[in-house]
Amino acid sequence: MKEIIKVSNLSKTFTTRKNDKTAAVREVSFVLNQGETLGLVGESGSGKSTIARLLMGLIAPDRGEIRIYDNDLKTLKKNPLDLYSKIQMVFQNPAESFDPRKTLGDGIAEPLKNRGYSKQEIEKRVVELLEMCGLTADFAAKTPASVSGGQCQRAAIARALAVQPEILICDEATSSLDVTVQRQIIDLLVELKNKQNLSIIFISHNLALVQMFCDRVIVLYNGKIVEEGEPDYIINNPQAEYTKLLLDSVL
Ligand code: ADP
Ligand code: MG
């Protein structure tokens, strides 16, 4: 199996202005294999979003290394357009992916514009992306505030996939949605994953969702990995005390 992300001994501590320190990520190592959906679970504050931001190069680690396709992320970051053609992210709050004053179509078009696509190519591609994500062409003219949360998240996924990334990081991408809509977004992600050959890191505090969607799961507690394995196995045979507590709280 081909490793497309390899994280080694990653650590990140935040220091507040009052000089309080939070060790958000502590000596974390894992790989993401090609075509895999890897779940990252843990309660609020366990370090999930910090790992996502480190993987996206939005913040720098204190120690450790991230390799994407066997290149050091530090080197890849020097060419952001190339890096973000490989790896994209979908956030918890779908509106976060869009400028509230612009249309969804403008938002989806932005990464294409940045890469020099022509106006005609962009118009065609935006419709293609909307339809791929279960929306109709008329959504291009709508603003984020005028559509439902589920529709906005579909548009955010369309935007993330505009430049055909190979890796998608979903940080609580379904957590703000109603249960039925959550299910629809997961179904969409499964479909896109197969069609677009994506590898996915699916971050969630909900082990049941992770069980439904992920090939492998990593359980985080206090910035550390406490357990790793197949979701069915972990849910039925949790080894770490913390995983047992997490199961009690969400299932
Ligand atoms: P999760 O996504 O699992 O809820 P986070 O990665 O957001 O967890 O946060 C992990 C820990 O790091 C928390 O204690 C959080 O308060 C702290 N933290 C995250 N970002 C910052 C920041 N920019 N400054 C200070 N502390 C932070
Ligand atoms: Mg988070």
Image (cartoon, helix red, strand yellow):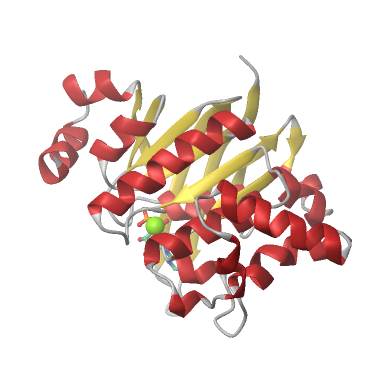
Q: Is residue 6 visible?
A: no
Q: Nearer the viewer, residue 110 or 3?
A: 110
Q: Is residue 185 above or below residue 103?
A: above
- Name the residue furthest top: 1
The part of the image, by quadrant, that contains residue 248 is top left
Image quarter hosting the N terminus = top right
Residue at 16% across, 37% down: 247
179 left or right of 210 in image: left
Residue 120, given in percent of the width and then of the height, sits at 85, 62
Residue at 76% across, 63% down: 123
Q: Nearer the viewer, residue 57 or 115?
A: 115
Q: Nearer the viewer, residue 10 or 3?
A: 3
Residue 166, given in percent of the width and then of the height, sits at 67, 37
Q: Is residue 112 above or below residue 7?
A: below
Image quarter hosting the C terminus = top left
If the picture is divided into quarters, which one holds ligand 1? bottom left
Residue at 47% across, 65% down: 152
Residue 136, given in percent of the width and then of the height, sits at 55, 59
Q: Nearer the viewer, residue 16 or 87?
A: 87
- Name the residue furthest bottom: 101
Number of numbered discs overlaid on the protein picture: 0
77 left or right of 38 in image: right
Residue 155, given in percent of the width and then of the height, sits at 54, 60
Q: Is residue 36 above or below residue 123?
A: above
Q: Is residue 151 visible?
A: yes
183 left or right of 111 in image: left
The part of the image, by quadrant, that contains residue 178 is bottom left
